[in-house]
Image (tube, grey):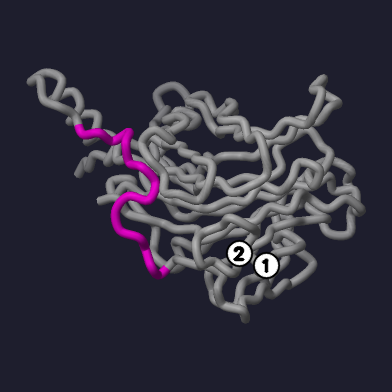
Amino acid sequence: MFRPSISQLVRAAVMTAVMVGCTLPAYAQIVPGSGRRLDRIFDDFEDEEWEYKYNLPKSSHEQDNRMRGPLAYSTNGMWAESGKRGTPDYVARVETPPNGIAGSKGALMIRTLNSGIPERIGGEPQQDDLIYRVANKAGSIPASAGPNVVVRLWIPPFEEFEKRTSSHFGIRLALSTTVEEKKGKWIFKRTVKTRESYWPGMFIQYFGTDRGHSEPKVNFVIRGADNGGDFPGPQIHKSGWWTVGMSVSPDGRVHYYAREGVENLRPQDKIASTTPYGYEAESMSTLFFNITSRNDGRTWSTPFVIDDPMVFRAY
């Protein structure tokens, strides 16, 4: 029996609404922070006993097909190492930087040094991942529920950035959709449906004076456009806190928001809405954080701090 996907149902509703002159739902305005917060997946880092347990050597499946378990984890069960890329080398509760969330005394610093294959200095930038265990705590969230996330992000002083023109930090979603592929040849050709995972997000990019700037420049970069490419977001003019969020609407689109400071996000804080890689999201499984380093065995990555990452269902 044929069962249409959520995205197919939404497209059908759109076409029907257009034909009869109805007003369509305002899917593009799921402002991150909307709806019901999932308390089972919330960490404010206020527990002074907060601890992260490393299980080195780290995993590096993306580079050499080796997943070195057991993986690193936080003792409160909210965080885990990525089996695909490996854990950041420094995951620690720190005193909340100035002007953070009112009453916050603890936040989380994420840094890394050896971001590539363990015991191998590659000299080319690599990335490590820290996973917020959304699916483990609350299950995979369908796009029809309007999943959305908010996190406060502290940008360090520009002189503390690793001197490397590239993306340094990422806040990303793990989404999945159904894709159709043609298999076989001639009269034996058939259409096969498979699940596809993808990871849109928002990155902090540093441009050094080596690129012709009179002084360093930092801005958000969005991944991704409908064709999967990156495109620029707001410029960051100074160190301090930003409120960053993403949402997924029932039509499968991803929406990106950012606002300087720690106040809640508003409709006017939206940067863009896209269908990354042309995919219409059907579910969200997690939120995770990228940290990158030069991977030269000497240079630590830029010290970013996050606080109060939250996950919501809009519907």
The three-letter code of the residue at mark 1 reads Val
Magenta span includes 35? yes
Location of mark 1 (residue) = 94
Using the numbered discs, state the Cα–Cα distance from disc 2 to disc 1 in whole angstroms: 5 Å
- Where is residue 304 drawn, in percent x and y? 68, 52
Mark 1, other Cα within 10 Å: few <14 / some 14–19 / many ≥20:
some
Residue 182 seen in the figure: no
Mark 2, other Cα within 10 Å: few <14 / some 14–19 / many ≥20:
many
Instruction: Tell me what residue is drawn at x 28 percent, y 46 percent.
Output: 144
Side of 30 relative to 134 (left or right): left
Residue lying at the far bottom in this picture: please name it.
49
Instruction: Tell me what residue is drawn at x 88 percent, y 50 percent.
Output: 299
Magenta range: 25-40
Q: Secondary structure at mark 2?
A: strand
The answer to whether 194 is drawn above or below residue 235 in the figure is below
Side of 5 relative to 267 (left or right): left
Location of mark 2 (residue) = 107
Instruction: Tell me what residue is drawn at x 77 percent, y 45 percent.
Output: 126
The answer to whether 216 is drawn above or below residue 249 in the figure is above
Who is closer to the viewer here, 10 or 218?
218
Instruction: Tell me what residue is drawn at x 79 percent, y 22 percent.
Output: 213
Magenta span includes 260? no
Mark 2 vs 1: CB contact within 8 A:
yes
Earlier-in-chain disc, 2 versus 1: 1
- Where is residue 27 drawn, in percent x and y? 28, 36
The three-letter code of the residue at mark 2 reads Ala
Who is closer to the viewer here, 42 or 199?
42
Who is closer to the viewer here, 49 or 273?
49
Residue 57 seen in the figure: yes
Q: Secondary structure at mark 1?
A: strand
